[in-house]
Amino acid sequence: MATETYDQLVAKAREVRLLSGVNGLLGWDQETYMPPRSAEIRADQLALLAGMIHDRVVAPEIEGLLASLEKEKLPPDRAAVVREGRRLYDRERKLPKELVEELARTTSRSQEAWAKARKEKDFAQFAPWLEKVIGLKRQAAKHLGLPGQDPYDALLDEFEPGATSAELTSLFSTLEGALVPLVKKLALAKKKPRVEILERHYPRAKQEEFGRLVAKDMGFDFEAGRLDVSNHPFCSGLQPDDVRITTRYREDDLTGSLFGIMHEAGHGLYEQGFDRKYFGTALAEPCSTGIHESQSRLWENMVGRSRPFWKHYYPELRRVFPEPLADVSEADFVFAVNDVRPSFIRTESDEVTYNLHVLLRFEVERDLLSGKLAVADLPRFWNDKMEKLLGVRPPDDAQGCLQDIHWSFGLFAYFPTYTLGNCYAAQFFATARKELDLDSLLARGELRPLREWLRKKVHERGGFFRPKDLVKDVTGAPPSSAAFVSYLETKYAELYGL
Ligand code: ZN
């Protein structure tokens, strides 16, 4: 009886997952190949699908199936499927269908408005759309939240189950205390990297060739995935056998595309690593957005910007670009890809200042949602805060508050998952180093053992655990920023000779 009920629940969940894959495919297309005049119809298509998915998630028979399974003694995997099924059902049921459709329609259009405003460096064009999106997100938070709950927490729970803005405030205050002085110390260091070596002429086709090689060595399966170009790199997991990543190329920037590829391939390995027999259920879904981000950061930074990695790959890179790298030693190169300096653009920033960019966004969106900060005042608030944290002031809004696509998408309370990802990644990486002879493996270009370790410890388990429990299970300790801060302090003291 329980088995039959469980199978019915899974069949329903699979339908939802199939539809959300279609939704993801349309979203991927919008960011890659869609002709511009298709924007309006695409918005209607996405809104219609969002409504259809919503209807299926909250279908009346789901409550009955969940309630009956909750009375049974189930094996742990099935119990986790039911637990997460309940979470999704309860969350989605609180949202009126009209609001879901309105959010999908508005955010699809506001992405177009954002892209144009950013291109023309004109915040005023985007402001009314941002106002609209915030209004809708406030309504969503009201429906989702418990009485008296901070609207930010209600939205955060979608991405990072169990996390609160109070925890984030304390995490960011610890990081600010450690990172602001570290950035200042590095700025004063006499030893400086030759960053100019990365800004020579590097033909795009060769960049792509090298990026594909590294992604393949990482274990990204190109028979079950693609690599394309978009404005804002992303990874779209339509299903474990169709995982699409993107990057962007600039011929005067050697490593932007590569680290973009390693980042997105790190996400992609997670998606390709889900256990297919659980497809449609939470066990073949990411544990949380922060855990997802830990996988990308670990590959991009802890592997991709490490000395052992380049011991093997620098000679390869030199074979691809013999001329521009002729006078560049391996040590020069490793130092240059780890240059730390205050800058305007989050996605191009280094590992140390990155989290200060996130801290700024956390404060902005918390205050926008609560109404403490008016949309019209955003550019000034942004620029002032940048100056306080990093000592630099953006010359225009394209390099300031218009740089990220997230808010136009309706992604509020999402940015902090980047920093949580950095912290989780450092904890996972420190544990992997204890359990594998990681430095020697990386130095030989053997990336697969790390992928296998992550697959077993993180990928295959999907949403079996909640994020805090997963970190504890894998590393033996609860989540904290200690491993991350210690990783940064050790690495950069050595690089800068402090
Ligand atoms: Zn990411």
Image (tube, grey):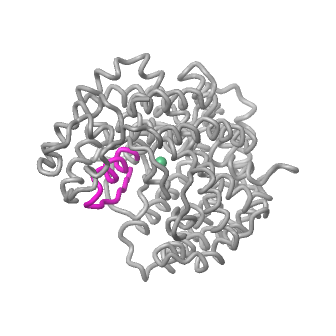
Please report the residue visible at 60 percent of the width from the left and 24 percent of the height from the top: 472
Where is residue 498 shown, x and y percent of the image?
A: 44, 29
Nearest the viewer among 463 and 11 is 463
Q: Which residues are magenta?
A: 243-263
Left or right position of 326 against 24 = left
Nearest the viewer among 85 and 371 is 371
* Residue 59 showing in the rendered view: no
Magenta span includes 491: no
Please report the residue visible at 37 percent of the width from the left and 31 percent of the height from the top: 451
In the rendered image, the vertical position of residue 205 relative to residue 299, given as above or below: below
Q: Place residue 124 in its image quadrant.
A: bottom right
Magenta span includes 247: yes
Residue at the extreme right: 148
Rendered-image quadrant of the N terminus? top right
Please report the residue visible at 78 percent of the width from the left and 64 percent of the height from the top: 371
Nearest the viewer among 213 and 366 is 366
Q: Place residue 139 in its image quadrant.
A: bottom right
Nearest the viewer among 419 and 464 is 419
